Amino acid sequence: MAERTNPSALPPVRARAVAFLAILVGGVCGLLIGLSLVSIQCEGSCATAEGAGALTGAVLGAGGVAVVAVLVLRAMGEWQARPGDRR
């Protein structure tokens, strides 16, 4: 049976799903960190500040993990696109 080759550099669905889950986890962790930092420093009613801190942390956390995930998926796709070039 001939080995199936993937002519595109698109990574497998499982790898993309894991990257998506990693981005979600990074966003949740960033949300918790941002919320905690504002909660520790704020006194009294500070729901707006906590929301802004949580949102900022979530965006930064998910964004950072997304950059790494895209780089990993691209490298993985390029590595799989040329199986004959490996030694």
Image (cartoon, helix red, strand yellow):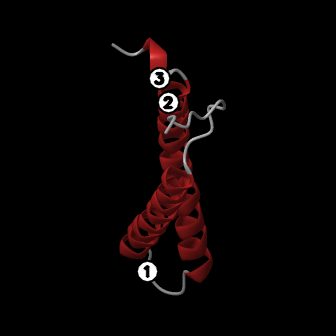
* Disc 2 element: helix
Farthest residue to the front: give it: 1
Q: Tell me which amino acid carries mark 2.
A: Gln
* Disc 3 element: helix
Kindly check if marks 1 and 3 are in contact, taking CB atoms under 8 A apart as contact. no
Left or right of 82, for residue 37: left
Residue at left 39%, top 16%? 86
Report which residue position mark 3 lands on.
Answer: 83
Q: Tell me which amino acid carries mark 1.
A: Glu
Residue at left 58%, top 57%? 59
Task: Compare residues 24 and 78 and report the one nearer the observer.
Answer: 78
Q: Tell me which amino acid carries mark 3.
A: Pro
* Disc 1 element: loop
Residue at left 47%, top 37%? 72
Kindly check if marks 2 and 3 are in contact, taking CB atoms under 8 A apart as contact. yes
Q: Position of residue 20 (x, y in %)?
A: 54, 58
Quadrant where the image shows the C terminus? top left
- Disc number at residue 21? none
Neighbour tally class for label 2: few under 14, some 14-19, many 20 plus, Cα within 10 Å: many
Report which residue position mark 2 lands on.
Answer: 80
- Disc number at residue 43? 1
* Image height of 6 relative to 29, above or below: above
